[in-house]
Amino acid sequence: KKVRISTKSRLPFCRSEGAKRPGGLTNVENIIPVVSGKGGVGKSTVSVNLAFALEKLGARVGLLDADIHGPSLPFLITPAEAKIKISSDKPGNLISPILHENVKCLSFGYVDGESGGHETAVMRGPMLSKVMTQLLTQSDWGELDYLVVDMPPGTGDIPITLSQNVSVTGAVVVTTPHRLSFPDVAKAIEMLASMKVPVFAVVENMGNFVCSHGTVYRPFGRGHLDLLEKNYGIKEKFSLSLSEEISKSNESRKPFVLCHKSAKDSQVYFSIAKSLIKKCLKIPHEPKKQLPSVKYDKKSNLLMLTVIGQNYAKLYEIDPKELRRRDPKTGAEVPGKCPAESSTVRKVNSVGNFGVGVEWSDGFRADIFPFETLLAIAQETEKK
């Protein structure tokens, strides 16, 4: 008798540093947002195919469509049952993601299972962020190696909320070769840098077109991948073609990597996934960077900023009123901006891996101060 044994091995994934996450994200190892500076660059297509490529490599994967105004996931996959439910066997009324081809999927487009993603979401910024946070943290993701988050285009409320409120491992940025894409992708990269989110890879979508005779055309130009590497030090660069097969896969709502496994563009998606895995595996072995801590000492009425490096630790004292006089982004003094003498700090709120927000006794609530800005203010005032 012949016995056939089939096994599926899983790569040893490691939780990224500081990845203690709230609610349903407790057992999620890595959160990977896929971002772009503008719409229409194929970010959702990249997100879907990246998620399913990771799953085919043996990872436990989740996929969240975080675009509330224009959810794309219902138009890119066809799960057997496309309606959100509540987990009845778990405490906390967590949302149950939809399982499709072993990937846990969730989108605001599935809130109304009968709408097929056509339900209109008329919301302003704060409500958008609240809904996205609910889908992210109040869903039963279970144990995942990767949660791929398809972000809405631009640098608005939702990307900032995600980066500030949960520990994001690293991002994938999607662009096109067209010169109009460069300023927008640069803004997206700079936003991620301000949030201390590393860019793991840049994906140039629609980089070329191969005609039936095999001739390669570049309808949108030579692209700007080399310039992005030069300006931002991003070495992991990938290019996908303008492909009729990818378009047909989207129309049939089947991930391209599942129905065209041997195609050149599928191999690019698997290369992106493998590069992502390597980046995440390196994180636990890299020198640890401890985030600064900020506390308010009522007795002295001073903010205590503690900065810890590999071979040093330093405590800075900041007069809170200095923050009322300063621009939160640049740290520069703003003429005429002066707090009431009786105003004191009521609360200091830590905002993820980004910085702190300060609430005052007179009701004033300043914008968030990045740690870098706080350190610059502390060093400047220390010299006076």
Image: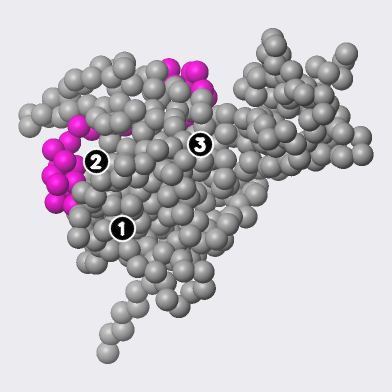
The magenta span reads: 226-253
Looking at the picture, tell me which residue is in the foreground, 42 or 352. Answer: 352
What is the C-alpha distance between the residues marked 2 and 1? 35 Å
Q: Residue at x 61, y 52 (%)?
A: 19
The answer to which quarter of the image holds residue 87 is bottom left
The numbered dot on residue 264 is: 2
Q: Residue at x 28, y 63 (%)?
A: 83
Question: Dot 2, how many residues are within 10 Å of its Cα: few (below 14), some (14-19), or many (20+)?
Answer: few
What is the C-alpha distance between the residues marked 3 and 1? 23 Å
Q: Is residue 247 magenta?
A: yes
Q: Position of residue 79 (x, y in %)?
A: 24, 62
Which of label 2 and label 3 is nearer to you?
3
Identify the mark nearer the N-term, 3 or 1.
Answer: 1
Kind of residue at badge 3: Ile
Q: Is residue 375 magenta?
A: no
Q: Position of residue 3 (x, y in %)?
A: 31, 84
The answer to which quarter of the image holds residue 180 is top left
Q: Residue furthest right?
A: 299
Question: Dot 1, how many residues are within 10 Å of its Cα: few (below 14), some (14-19), or many (20+)?
Answer: some
Looking at the picture, tell me which residue is in the foreground, 344 or 58. Answer: 344
Quarter of the image with the C terminus is: top right
Secondary structure under tag 3 reads: helix
* 346 to the left or right of 178: right
Kind of residue at badge 2: Lys
The numbered dot on residue 160 is: 3
Q: Residue at x 59, y 55 (%)?
A: 21
Secondary structure under tag 2 reads: helix
- Residue to which mark 1 is pinned: 111
What is the C-alpha distance between the residues marked 2 and 3? 34 Å
The numbered dot on residue 357 is: none
